[in-house]
Image (cartoon, helix red, strand yellow):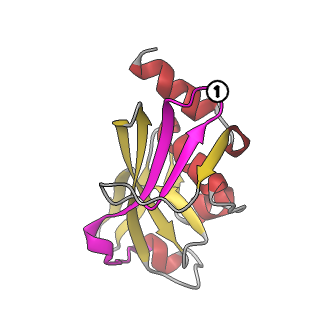
Amino acid sequence: MNYFSILTKVEASSPDDWTKVENVTTEDGHRQLYVFHEDAAISLAWGKDHLDGEPWTEAWSESGGFPDKKIYGHWLDIRYNGVPIQRDLVLSVDGGRCVLPSGNPISEAGKGVIGMKVSEPEMQRARLLDGLLEHSQFDRYSMSANIQF
């Protein structure tokens, strides 16, 4: 199995293809771990804080209709045999009601960051994590945050 085939399997999977390992904190600070049913060597580790857990806001979070405008960054690691092979920064928004991909900021003069440009694989991985966390409004939040790919 190579790097690209692992990513393809993860990106094509659904939340039903994973099992959450309860009561886990990894040595590198992740708070949740999921194991892939098809190949237990593939796992997702999520929850290590970005920016020491400090929130921030952007123009898109302030104008996106979110009751809670704070953004919290967390790392999502795809692991093979416990070794991270891909790391994504994902954004927890609206009081933890959705997880979005971070991508590259889209800025507009005088307005700041008004959205994000992401790749389709980044979108798929964030959508998977959002589903694993049992959220249900990924598309609505993606549209409100002006995520483009």
Height in image: 73 above or below 58? above
Looking at this view, name the residue that lies furthest to the bottom. 67
Looking at this view, name the residue that lies furthest to the top. 1
Q: Is residue 110 visible?
A: no
Residue 57 falls left or right of residue 32: left
**Residue 136 position within the rendered picture, expressed as x and y whole percent measured from the top left:** 72, 61
Name the one closer to the observer, 88 or 27: 27
Q: Range of the magenta residues?
A: 31-59
Residue 103 falls left or right of residue 67: left
Name the one closer to the observer, 60 or 123: 123
> Is 6 within the magenta?
no
Report which residue position mark 1 lands on: 38
**Residue 87 position within the rendered picture, expressed as x and y whole percent measured from the top left:** 35, 43
Q: Residues within 10 Å of mark 1 (few under 14, many from 20)?
A: few
Looking at this view, name the residue that lies furthest to the left. 51
Name the one closer to the observer, 43 or 114: 43
Q: For mark 1, give the secondary structure.
A: loop
Height in image: 86 above or below 113? above
**Residue 131 position within the rendered picture, expressed as x and y whole percent measured from the top left:** 66, 53
Q: Residue at x 38, y 47 (%)?
A: 88
Q: Residue at x 49, y 29 (%)?
A: 41
Residue 145 falls left or right of residue 15: left
Disc 1 marks a residue whose amino acid type is: Glu
Q: Is residue 42 visible?
A: yes
Name the one closer to the observer, 9 or 136: 9
Q: How many marks?
A: 1
Q: Residue at x 41, y 30 (%)?
A: 81
**Residue 59 position within the rendered picture, expressed as x and y whole percent measured from the top left:** 41, 74
